[in-house]
Image: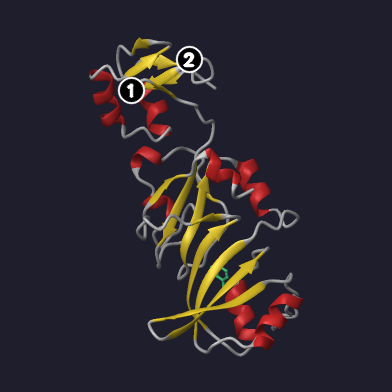
Amino acid sequence: MAIERLDKVLARQGIGSRREVKELVRQKQVTVNGRPAASAEEKVDPDRDILAVSGRALTLRRHLYLMMNKPKGVVSATRDGACPTVLDLVPEHLRRRGLFPAGRLDKDTVGFVLLTDDGDFAHRMLSPKRHVPKTYHAQLERPITDQDVQAFAQGMTLANGEVCLPAQLQPLPQEEGCPMAQVILREGMYHQIKRMFAARGNRVVELRRVKLGNLPLDPTLKPGECREINDKELEQIL
Ligand code: URA
């Protein structure tokens, strides 16, 4: 990794904004190879230098992984002519070049979107061979039936003839008097869940992605908020 400014490296690690890092440096809370950092603008080598904040050494991460609770009306893309994108919602101290959403949610779907600058990780996560499970909660027009559960489990054929991999469908308790169901997919076809229910004569009213792999969406994240995913959590995805 190239030589970089200390405040940039620490901000990227989620220690705080550059202004907050500057304050930590001023309070002598930041050390570089055991000595207090002289300035937030000091140049460091993240591959070699040992950085510590308040006495705790940092394990520097080459890449950034963010969990976002995507709200409605926001597009899972890096750019859009008309609508705000998930990138627009990333706070300044977590922004970095090359960040993109790994996988898409429809504009009106809410919940877990992973953003990263790690192309290899995204590729592995989205690879059709890996079949990383993605868990959704759907509010439906009508309650599901045992036949729906079987049809999802067998691998449904959509209206246009596309065949889905077997998917897990199960009922959930009603929310505000509306029928709810959980769906676990191991692939990501365009509008897949909406089209699966449509093929069963039902309709998705609201859709929320709640889990990627075994990692649940942090329930403390409000719509539009994001936070870094730590190493342990990352292992729960792949
Ligand atoms: N299935 C859909 O229909 N929409 C999504 O956003 C995700 C899965």
Residue position for label 1: 54
The answer to whether residue 226 is visible is yes
Q: Residue furthest top?
A: 35
Q: Residue furthest front?
A: 173
In the image, residue 176 above or below residue 182: below
In the image, residue 116 above or below residue 207: above
Residue lying at 57% horizontally and 65% vertically, measured from the top left: 135
Residue position for label 2: 49
Residue 195 location (% of width, % of height): 62, 79
Circle 2 sits in a helix, a strand or a loop, which is it? loop
The N terminus lies in quadrant: top right
Mark 2 → mark 1, Cα distance in angstroms: 16 Å
Identity, as a three-letter code, of the amino acid under mark 1: Ser
Quarter holding residue 161: bottom right
Residue 141 location (% of width, % of height): 50, 87
Residue 66 location (% of width, % of height): 47, 46
Q: Nearer the viewer, mark 2 or mark 1?
A: 1
Identity, as a three-letter code, of the amino acid under mark 2: Asp
